[in-house]
Image (cartoon, rainbow, N blue to C red):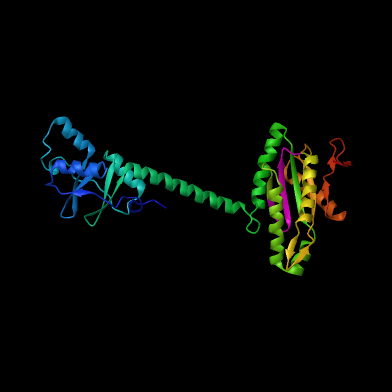
Amino acid sequence: MLNRLDLVMTRSIIAISPDSNIIKAVKLMQDNKISCIIVVSNNSPVGIVTERDIVNIVANGENFEKPVSEIMSQPLISAGPKTLLNRALNIMRTNHIRRLPVIENETLVGLVTETNLLVASRRTMIAMEQKHQKTKNLAMEDKITGLYNRRYFQSVMKKELNRARRYGALLSLILIDIDHFKKINDTFGHSVGDAVLKKLSKIFRDSARKVDIVFRYGGDEFAIVCPISGTRSSRIFAERLIKTIEKKPVIHNGTKLAVTISVGICKYTSMSSSIEKMVKRADKALYRAKQNGRNQVCVAERVTSENPQVLMRG
């Protein structure tokens, strides 16, 4: 991270002795396309001559043959190579200067400008933000599949439910369970089980719309939050997932593993207006899909407001 002067300073420095005349200083600045030149005596910096100093000489009609020691700014304001960027910027702004020589053991080792420091500070801020975002993403991701985890599911569902309530928008929740996943682990080992999780995760992610959010809900369970999606479109999507998985089997040692999924779907209604209620109803639909033979989709039964005990097919 670029947070110290020694990491951003210019090490190639043009210097001049105090008894050199102003003409030489001007020529060095022109030839090297620099806006300042450090005045050094016995390897120790003693002052600085800037383009502003030269402009003042021209404006006042002064003699260009006199030594730079008569026009240089002194005492020289400087900082050490380990000085932090923010501290260096404060030094420059407090003293109303735009360039800061970097000195170590009384020897000039570098030079930074205000622009150098601002650019470096901006890069440091961006790097810190990227690191923070990466840490935040890791906290939201499942390590095996790379999908969002259950903790983040709660956050997303809360936001999407609030949107559905406020705007009357459609919202569906799809819960997915891998059929006989324990048998796969027991028969082929957990490494193969992990390969199945990764394979299906990729299918879910690739098949989902951009607005859909896919989660590893836990173990062999997955959840897909589908904004702007009702029961019909969510069911079509889920049935397409089942067919895609059938066409893309997991291969282990040359053997195709017959992996299937069971799916339960619940859409947002006034009777399913909380995370807990939607998950519970989607889970019940998933359980029915398993009871009915697995490898299929079931939609949550709708509860009427007049008689909560009466169940109707959604």
Percent x, y for residue 125?
Answer: 44, 46
Near-viewer residue (188 or 97): 188
Q: Quadrant of residue 54?
A: top left
Image point (54%, 49%), residue name: 133
Q: Is residue 114 above or below residue 137?
A: above
Q: How far across and down, in percent of the image, does residue 241 sit?
A: 77, 50
Give left or right: position of 284 versus 129.
Answer: right
Q: 119 and 163: which one is in front? A: 119
Quadrant (top left, top right, bottom left, bottom right) of the C terminus: top right
Q: Tell me if 216 is positioned left or right of 110 in this view.
A: right
Please give the range of residues in magenta. Answer: 215-229
Q: Is residue 223 left or right of residue 286?
A: left
Judge whether 4 appears above or below 49 on screen.
below
Type of secondary structure dominating the magenta stretch: strand
Of all residues, the one furthest to the front in this rendering is 31
Please say whether residue 182 is one of the residues in the magenta stretch. no
Q: Position of residue 304 (x, y in %)?
A: 85, 37
